[in-house]
Image: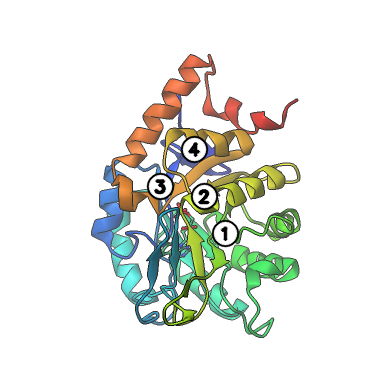
């Protein structure tokens, strides 16, 4: 029973991938996650210069998911290249996540990182100078243009990660495909908030944060299902995956691989192997030879 998957030119030993932002800033943690069984690991999103992020509280545990407002803290490009060299020396399948506020910055990051990673993942959930403060990932022409310019600078496949905007997701993913993306990751967190009834104020300094975990799953799953109907490139599902059943749901909706973030907090690093074992067993019980034959099955009536 084979569970290796190919995402265009990329081949992974299994479909489970570490999502960006969780254990992704140091070589030792990225290597540890890969050794624990992930098919690939995505780094924390990197900017050109070091970024300190926001003041606490940066993470709210809702019980049914998390709202985070980290502000994309990272040590910056130069320091991450040092870490990536170590990760690559261990033959780890590594995706470098990048974020920037305009196309020139994205191009610069891509050209500097392309030699040290197996793929670039564009985190487009950041305010842009082009759209004066609007998020790139919400506007199809910006998604297409940013993807195209990064694609021109990159020697490795470009993956575009988008927000869980179910009503717009077909346009956004098609824009990424038209720009030259090899795959899309669906999805990033959803804009969300929490109010403290005692202080009568929003809890997070920046008011809004990103919803992840169990509460996000139905939204991200709907994005995968909808995008699968229009796209030719592979989809990586992401959002609230805690078990093999969650992973199989995403695959049935149309994902070829899946990313895991929040679940690591409660399930630990054993989750990658556990999900792979569950998928293999499911394939066996359903007499399906290859994971590929499962992709998108929920669409056939
Ligand atoms: C604490 C935290 C930090 C995150 N940082 C990033 C990041 O730097 N870049 C990014 O593209 N996504 C980031 N994300 C989003 C995750 O990669 C993922 O898309 C999202 O959390 C949904 O998956 P999950 O429900 O499995 O966590 C972060 C999520 C969390 C919870």
Residue 273's image quarter?
Answer: top left
Circle 2 sits on which residue? 238
At a point 51% along the width and 52% down the height, the residue shown is 215
Residue 115 x/y as whole percent: 43, 62
Q: Nearer the viewer, residue 78 or 253?
A: 253
Mark 2 near mark 1, Cβ–Cβ under 8 Å? yes
Q: Is residue 253 above or below residue 286?
A: below
Left or right of 180: which side holds 54? Answer: left
- Observer-side mark, 4 or 3, equals 4
Q: Residues within 10 Å of mark 4 (few under 14, many from 20)?
A: many
Circle 3 sits on which residue? 40
Q: Describe the element under mark 2 as helix, strand or loop.
A: strand
Tell me if the residue at label 2 has its CB under 8 Å from ligand 1.
yes
- Observer-side mark, 1 or 4, equals 4
Q: Is residue 31 above or below residue 132?
A: above
Tell me if the residue at label 4 has its CB under 8 Å from ligand 1.
no
Circle 4 sits on which residue? 247
Q: Describe the element under mark 1 as helix, strand or loop.
A: strand
Mark 1 near mark 3, Cβ–Cβ under 8 Å? no
Residue 120 x/y as whole percent: 50, 60
């Amino acid at each position: 029973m084979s569970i290796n998957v190919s995402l265009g030119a990329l081949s992974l030993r299994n479909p489970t991938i570490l999502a960006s932002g969780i254990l992704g800033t140091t070589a030792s943690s990225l290597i540890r996650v890969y050794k624990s069984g992930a098919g690939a690991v995505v780094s924390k999103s990197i900017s050109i210069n070091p970024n300190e992020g926001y003041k606490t509280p940066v993470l709210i545990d809702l019980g049914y998911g998390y709202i985070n407002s980290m502000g994309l803290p990272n040590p910056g490009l130069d320091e991450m290249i040092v870490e990536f060299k170590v990760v690559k020396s261990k033959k780890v399948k590594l995706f470098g996540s990048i974020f920037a506020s305009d196309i020139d910055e994205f191009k610069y990051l891509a050209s500097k990182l392309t030699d040290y990673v197996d793929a670039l993942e564009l985190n487009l959930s950041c305010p842009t100078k082009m759209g004066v403060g609007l998020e790139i990932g919400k506007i199809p022409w910006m998604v297409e243009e940013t993807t195209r310019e990064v694609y021109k600078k990159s020697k490795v496949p470009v993956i575009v990660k988008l927000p869980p905007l179910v009503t717009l997701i077909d346009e956004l993913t098609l824009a990424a495909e038209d720009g030259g993306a090899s795959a899309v990751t669906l999805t990033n967190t959803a804009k969300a908030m929490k109010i403290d009834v005692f202080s009568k104020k929003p809890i997070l300094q920046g008011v809004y944060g990103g919803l992840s975990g169990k509460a996000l799953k139905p939204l991200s799953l709907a994005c995968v299902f909808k995008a699968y109907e229009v796209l030719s490139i592979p989809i990586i599902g992401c959002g609230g995956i805690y078990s093999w059943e969650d992973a199989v749901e995403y695959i049935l909706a149309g994902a070829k691989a899946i990313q895991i973030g929040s679940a690591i907090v409660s399930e630990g690093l054993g989750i990658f192997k556990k999900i792979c074992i569950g998928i293999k067993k499911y394939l066996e019980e359903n007499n399906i030879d290859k994971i590929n034959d499962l992709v998108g099955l929920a669409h056939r009536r």
